[in-house]
Image (tube, rainbow, N blue to C red):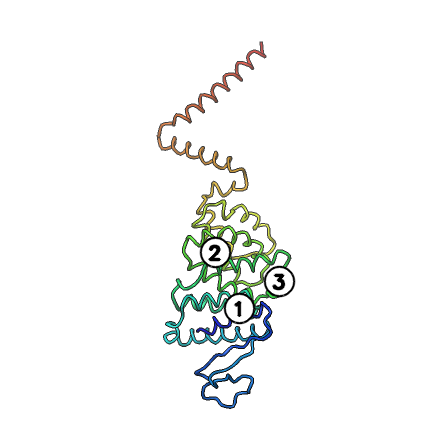
Amino acid sequence: MFLIEDVLHAASLSVSGSSRVMIKCFSECFSGIEDLPPTNKPIDGCGLLVDLSGKSRLQHFATWILKLISKCLTEGTLYVEGLIHASFVSSVCSLLCYGDSDLHMACFDFVHIIATVTDYELIPHQNLIRSIITILNLDKEGLPCFRNTTYDSSLGVCLNTLHSSCPEDIVKLTAADLVGVFFGSLWRTKSQQLKVALCGAYVRIAQVCPPHVWKPEHLISALCHPEPCLPLIECFQVAVSTLGPHLFGGIQGNNKNVALLSNENKSIESIRHGQKRSIQDMDNLKIKRQKLNEEIDFTDASIE
C-alpha cells in the first residue's frame, strides 16, 4: 500500500523537472525471479526497479497499480481491508492532480469501491467533491477533450457514492459550487450515470439547504429544454414538497410578493378556522376602509 505514496512522490518529482525517477517496488513478489533485465533489477537484488521518468510512464503505472488494488479489494476484501488507511486513500485522491483520463477513472472507481467495502471516514469527501466540481466546471465551452461518456459515467458513479454518504455539513459546504455546475453539466453530458448523480446530489442539497442555495427558479427554465431528463422528476418532487405548491408556482416572481402571498394565505386560513384577526390585520383593514370612504366622498363631490 505504500507504493501509491511512493508513486505520488515520484509524480511530484516528475512535475518539478527531475531528469530520472526510479522506484523500487514488489520486493517480495519478485524476490524469486532471477532473469529480470538489468535495468529493472535493484542493486540488492530484491524486488523490481521501475523507471517512472516522464509523465506518460508514471500515469500508466499508477493506473495499473490502482486497478490491481481495486481488484484485490473487490475479490479479497477480508485480506486487504485492514491494510487501507487514511494516508493511503489521500494519496490515491491526490493522483487526480497528475493523471490523464485513464488515471482519473481508475481513481473514481477506487473511491467507489473503497466507500462500498470499507469505512466512510477514510475518504476525504469534501476535497473529492470539490475536485469533481472543478472537472465539471471545465465544460463551459463544451466538453474537454479528456471527457467522454465512459469518463462521465465513472465520475458519476463516484459522485453518487460520495455525495450520498457524506455528512450534512459537507453537503452544505459544497452545495453552492455544485449547484453552480449542475444545469450546465446536466445538459452537456451524455452519461445517464452522471445525470442520476447530479440530480441525486441536487435532491439532497434541497433537503438540507435553504432555497436561495439550490435556486428552484432554474428548475422552471429546465422545462423548456428540448431534451427530456427523467432524473429531474425527483428534483421537481422535492422542490414542490419543500416549498409547497402555492409558492412553487410563483417562485420566479419577487420574493417580497411571494412572502406577501404567503402571509395573506395564512390570514385567510385563520379566519376560516374561526380565529380572531391579528392587530396588524385590523390596522390594514382600517386603512382599506379609510381609502374606500375617501374614494366614495370624492365621487359624491364630483357628482354634485
Residue 144 marker: 3
Q: Residue at x 53, y 68 (%)?
A: 105
Crowd rating for badge 1 (residues with CA inside 10 Å; few <14, some 14–19, many 20+): many
Is disc 3 placed on a helix, strand or loop? loop
Which mark is first along the chain, 1 or 3? 1
Residue 226 to residue 259: above or below: below
Is disc 1 placed on a helix, strand or loop? helix
User: Observer-nearest residue: 272 or 141?
Assistant: 141
Is disc 2 placed on a helix, strand or loop? helix
Residue 101 in the figure: left or right of residue 244? right
Residue 56 to residue 264: above or below: below
User: Observer-nearest residue: 33 or 233?
Assistant: 33
| Disc 1: which residue | 105
Q: Residue at x 51, y 77 (%)?
A: 23
Crowd rating for badge 2 (residues with CA inside 10 Å; few <14, some 14–19, many 20+): many
Calculate the distance from the C-alpha at mark 3 to the C-alpha at mark 1. 15 Å
**Residue 42 in picture, x, y percent from top left:** 50, 83
Q: Quadrant of residue 16?
A: bottom right
